[in-house]
Image (cartoon, helix red, strand yellow):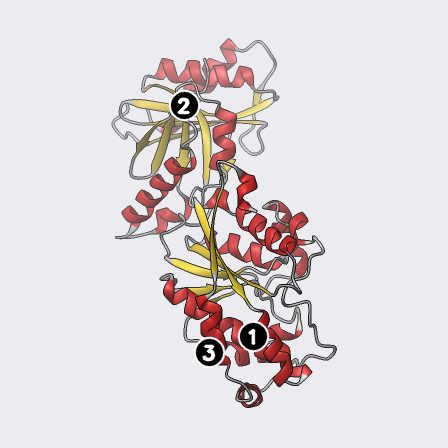
Amino acid sequence: MEYNHILIRFGELTTKGKNRKAFIQKLFHNTKTALQPFTKLSYQLTYDRMYILLNGEDSEAVCQRLKQVFGIRSFSLALKVPSEIEAIKEAACHLLKETPGKTFKIDTKRNDKTFFMQSQEISRAVAGYIFHHIDREIKVDVHNPDIRIRIEVRKQESYVMNDVILGAGGYPVGIGGKALLMLSGGIDSPVAGYLTLKRGVMIECIHYASPPYTSDRAREKVLELAKKLTPYTPEIKVHIIPFTDLQLAIYEHTPESYAMTVMRRMMYRIAEKVALQEDCLAIANGESIGQVASQTLESMKTINEVISLPVIRPVVCLDKLEIMDIAHQIDTYDISIRPYEDCCTIFTPKQPATKPKAEKARTFEENFDFESMIDDCVAQKETIVVKEFEENDDDLF
C-alpha cells in the first residue's frame, strides 16, 4: 500500500467571503502551473480541499514543489480508500506499521455526516484494530503522540494520513494585482520581493545600473536574485535603467549631504513612470526603518512625496537578522553579499542627511533639468524576462 494522493489545505483562503471562489481558483491554477513538470498528476478541487492524484509520480519531488506555492497552509500525503470502516482501519494500521514511534493518536474528521459512526467512534474503532494487528508495543497518547494518524471521512472515499507538511502560507500569487520591486542587489530587496509575492501580489523588478561605475557582474547578480524568486511565480520582468548620466548630474548640482536624498527621489520618479507603463498598482522595496540614512522616517517622507503610487515596504519593521534569516531561507543571501558595487554604494556621501527637508531637496532639484533626464532613463530601459527554467541559462547573462 503506497501513498496515492496529496491532500491540500487552504489556510487564510478559508476566511474569505464572497470572493473565496476567486482565491481558490487562482490557487488551483498556480498549483497546476507549478507542477507542470509532473505530467501524470491529476487534480480534484472541492470547497475546502484540493486533491492531487499522484499516478506514480515521485511524491517527495511533488511535495518539495508544493512547499513553494503561496496560498497553501499545509498538505499531507494520503491513502485514499473507500468510505468503509474496514478499509479505513487497514489503511491506518498500515501507516502506523510504516512509521517509527511508541505512542499514537487517531484524529478523525467526519465530513460526511451521514456516515454511520461518529468521529470519536471511528477513532476508537481504528485504535482497537491497531492494537490487535501490530506486532510492536505501542500505546495511545492524546497529548503528545509520536505518531498522529489523521482520517477524513467523505461521501465516496476517505483519506488516511500520518504527517502534515507546512506550506508557504499567504495568498495565491496574482490575486492581489502587481507591484514594481526596486531590486538593488542587496540583502533586503529580494526578501521584500518574496514577502510581496507571499501576499498574492505579482512583481516586476526595476534595477538602476550606472556603467562604467557598476559592472556587468552587478547586473548578473541582480538577474540571479530575480531568478531565485521565480519558483514562486512563473516569470519576472526585470527593467534595467541606465542611471549614470542622471546620477552624475545629481552629484554635480546637489550638496553631498543631500545627494542620496535627491537620488532616491529620482529613483522613485523613474519607478513610478515604469510602474504605470507596466500596469503596476504599487512600488515595493526593501526599506527598513533606520537601517541607513535614507530610511529614517524623515527621509522616507521627503523621498516619498514625489510620487502618488503607494509604496509597499514588507521588511520595514524587521531587524537585519530577521531579514537575513529569510534571505537564507529563500537562498538569496550568498548572492546578495557578492562584493559588486551598485549605484547606491559607488558615491556614498560621508555625512548624508538623516532628517532631510523636502523644501531643500526641491531647491537643489531646480538646479538642473532632471525631468528630461528621467524621460531618457525610462525610454532607454532594457527589459529582460527571467524564468525559472530556461532552455539555456547561459543566455540569461
Query: Residue 246: which disc?
Result: 1
Left of 379 or right of it: where is 241?
right
- Frontmost of labels 2 and 1 is 1
Tag 2 secondary structure: loop
- Of mark 2 and mark 3, the one earlier in the sequence is 2
Left of 140 or right of it: where is 23?
left
- Of mark 3 and mark 1, the one earlier in the sequence is 1
Vertical placement of residue 365 versus 300, above or below: below
Amino acid at pointer 1: Leu
Tag 1 secondary structure: helix
Give the position of the N terminus as an image quadrant: top left
* Distance Cα–Cα, label 3 vs label 1: 10 Å
Tag 3 secondary structure: helix
What percent of the width, then of the height, locates residue 37?
Answer: 43, 30
Vertical placement of residue 86 versus 275, above or below: above
**CB contact under 8 Å: marks 2 and 3:** no
What percent of the width, then of the height, locates residue 236?
Answer: 46, 50
Amino acid at pointer 2: Leu
Q: Which residue is mark 2?
A: 54
Amino acid at pointer 3: Ser
Q: Nearer the viewer, residue 205 or 54?
A: 205
Look at 57% across and 9% down and name the residue there: 135
- Frontmost of labels 2 and 3 is 3
Q: Nearer the viewer, residue 318 or 261?
A: 261
* Distance Cα–Cα, label 2 vs label 1: 55 Å
Left of 338 or right of it: where is 164?
left
Q: Quadrant of residue 156?
A: top left
**CB contact under 8 Å: marks 2 and 1:** no
Vertical placement of residue 164 versus 78, above or below: below
Q: Nearer the viewer, residue 196 or 390?
A: 390
Around disc 2, counting alpha carbons within 10 Å, would you say few (fewer than 14), some (14 to 19), or many (20 or more)?
many
Q: Which residue is mark 3?
A: 372
